[in-house]
Amino acid sequence: MESTKTIVLDRDGVINKDSPDYIKSHEEWIPLPGSLEAISSLHQAGFHVIVATNQSGLARGLFDEFELAKMHHKFCSMVEEEGGFVSGIFYCPHSPDDECECRKPNTGMLVQAENELGVSLNGSPFVGDSLKDLQAAMAHRMNPILVRTGNGSKTEQQIDGTNLSHVPVYDDLQQAVADILDEEV
């Protein structure tokens, strides 16, 4: 596997606005302030940017694969307009009851990303807003990072005093990326 700088990002609540009713269309997919610029900064600094996202709305029949592809096309186009690039988007289409290997906190999407992109995620940062994101990162020997956007503020309270209380917490993706890039220098 190629040794390269790689980062994994959760999607809803980290890159784009989240909703308890799910993001069901490309019209509902709205980037959070600064997130596209942060992804562009990562790309320009030589990072492979990978997205790993649970999308149980597919299993629930709230949208189909075609609409999900339109959301991801919109996202990637917007990142490219900012001078960035997304190396891969991996998603779990299953419901929480399906007991699949890909749904976070399981690591199937991360294994798939490594295999398809020929990279190792060992020690790479994984930015998320949920406990499942942090657990997946830990299970795959990655460095979990929490952002307060999306469900992150609630997650921050959940991890206080647990074995995840060491996880760095940032207000948003832009702040997290600025710190990651500062450490690169």
Image (spheres, rainbow, N blue to C red):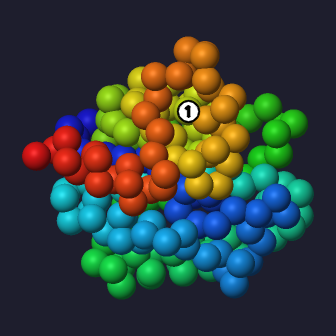
Residue at 45% x, 46% y: name it.
Answer: 170
In x, y percent, where is residue 112? 50, 42
In x, y percent, where is residue 26? 67, 80
| Horizontal relation, residue 55 to residue 167: left or right | right
Q: Is residue 65 above or below residue 182?
A: below
Q: Is residue 160 above or below residue 109?
A: above
User: Mark 1 sits on what residue?
Assistant: 134
Quadrant in which residue 162 is drawn = top right
Q: Residues within 10 Å of mark 1 (few under 14, many from 20)?
A: many
| Horizontal relation, residue 176 to residue 99: left or right | left
Q: Which quadrant would the N terminus be assigned to in this image?
A: top left
Residue at 47% x, 39% y: name it.
Answer: 169
Choose between 33 and 120: the one closer to the eye: 33
In x, y percent, where is residue 3? 20, 38
Quadrant in which residue 114 is drawn = top left
**Residue 113 shows in this picture:** no
Q: Residue extending furthest left?
A: 185
Secondary element at image label 1: helix
Choose between 15 and 161: the one closer to the eye: 161
| Horizontal relation, residue 101 to residue 164: left or right | right
In x, y percent, where is residue 141? 42, 24
